[in-house]
Image (cartoon, grey):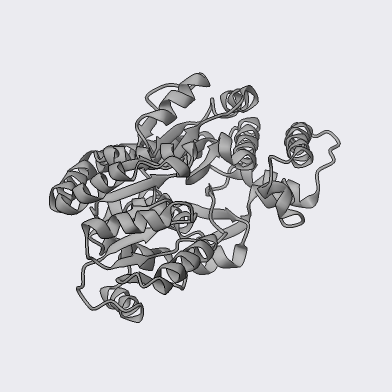
Amino acid sequence: MKKRDILVLGGYGGNNVGDDAQLEGSLNALKETIPEASVIVLTPNLDQTMSRHWPNSVAYAPRISFFDFDKDPHRYIKWWVKGNKEWLLNQLKFIISEAIKYKSGLSYSLSDKQVQAIELIKNASIIYYAGGGFLMGPTGSRLWDGALVCQLAKIFDTPVVMSGQNLGIWQNQFNLDLAAYSFDKVKLIGTRDRTFSKEELSKAGIQGDHIFDTHDDALYIKTDEVKIRDYILRRVGLKQDEPYISLSFHLEDGIENVIRSIRKHSKLPILIIPTCPPDKGPQGRVYKKLKDAGFGGLHIVSHLHSHNKIKSLIGNADICISTRHHPVIFALGCSVPAISLNYTEYFSQKNFGALELCNIGHLSFDMKDTKDVDFISLESLISEALENRDSLSETIKKSHTSIIDNKNRFLEILRDIWDESVVNDR
C-alpha cells in the first residue's frame, strides 16, 4: 500500500544557497499543487534542511543511504578517482540486485539503513527530483545516484517526476546507456533550458510531450524584506538606494580583468556576493588584492547569507555578473539583466540555457581558456547590459509569461500523476 508521501530529492544540504533556493521553490509548488500530500525531503543534513524549510519530514539522502556519504564523503565527491568510481558503480549494481531480491521475498544482504531508504521509495506516491545540474556526466556520482533511485522506482512502480533539471553532457557511452535505461519511465520532466537537455535526452532515446522547459525551480522564490537587505548594504558600505553591480564568482582566474573591464564602462560600486562556502576564499583574495592596489568602489559581502537575502541583494542590483548559476537565476527572477561567465562546458550549458529561456542568451560569455579571453567582447556585453538595462529588463519580464504558462501546465500534469497514483493504489 502506497502512502500519500512525496519524496523530494535534490542537491541541497551543503550550504549552497542555490540548492536551498531550488528546494524552497519545489516545496512551494508541491504545497500549492498537492496540499494534501505529506512531503519527505531526503537530505544529507537532516537538522539543517528541517530548520531551513520545515517540510513534513526528513530522511537521509540516497548518497548516505546507498553510497555511505556519511562514512567517506570524499569517495562520493571525488567520484572520478579510479578506486572510488569502481566502488560507487559496484554499489549501484549491488543495491539494484538486492532490491529485486527484497521485493521478491528472497534472502537479501541490505543493511537496515538501505532497507529504510528502499521502503521510502517503495511506499511513496511520487518521487520528485527538485532541480539542478546533477543528472549530468560532469557530476558523475550524482548522476549514478539519480539513476539508482529511478531504477528502484521502476522496480517498485513508483512514478518519478523531474523538475528544473539540466540533463546530459553524458561524456561516455556508459553514462548515456545508464540514462537511457534509468530515465525512460520518468513520468514528467521539467528542464531549465529549451535546447540541449532535450537533445541530450533524445540521444538516450527519451522524447515526448512529457518534457517541458519550465526554468529553474528557484526562479520565483521570495526575496527577504527590504529593511534586511538595506541593513546588509549599509554594513558593506553602500548607501540606501545607491545603485550597484552585483558580482559572484568561485574562481580567481581572469576575475581581476573582469572587474577592470566593468570599471571601464561604469563608475557604479561593485558588490561581491558569495553563494556557497567555497566562494569566500577566492572572493576575499581578489578583493584584498584590488583594495591594496587602490581600486575604489569595491565592496564585499563576507558573510554567507540565506538564499532569500542573497536574492534580495542581487535582485536590487542594476546588473548581475556571475560565474555561478544561481546568481543568474536570482537576477532573472527579478528581471535584472545578467551576464554569465562560463569556465566549463557544464556551466556554459546551464547558464546559457537559463538566459536563453529569458531571451537574453547572448549575455552568456565563455571563459574556458582564461589565457585567451576576449575581454573586448566582454566589455561590449557589459556596456550593452548597462546602457540597455531597462529594455533588457522588459525582455526578461515578457519571457516570464511563457515560463509561467509552461510551469502551470507542468503542475497540472503533476497533479494528474498524483491522482492516478493514489487511485491505482486503493
Query: Percent x, y for residue 398?
Result: 17, 43
**The C terminus appears in which quarter of the rendering?**
top right
Q: Is residue 414 left or right of residue 70?
A: left
In-front residue for pair 221/384: 384
Q: Residue at x 33, y 41 (%)?
A: 364
In the rendered image, the vertical position of residue 385 relative to residue 52, given as above or below: above
**The N terminus appears in which quarter of the rendering?**
top right
Q: Quadrant of residue 211?
A: top left
Q: Is residue 242 left or right of residue 312?
A: left
In-front residue for pair 256/138: 256
Q: Residue at x 47, y 31 (%)?
A: 187
Query: Percent x, y for residue 256?
Result: 41, 58
Q: Residue at x 39, y 48 (%)?
A: 217
In the rendered image, the vertical position of residue 110 relative to residue 16, given as above or below: above
Q: Is residue 397 visible?
A: yes
Q: Quadrant of residue 109?
A: top right
Query: Percent x, y for residue 128?
Result: 50, 44
Q: Is residue 116 visible?
A: no
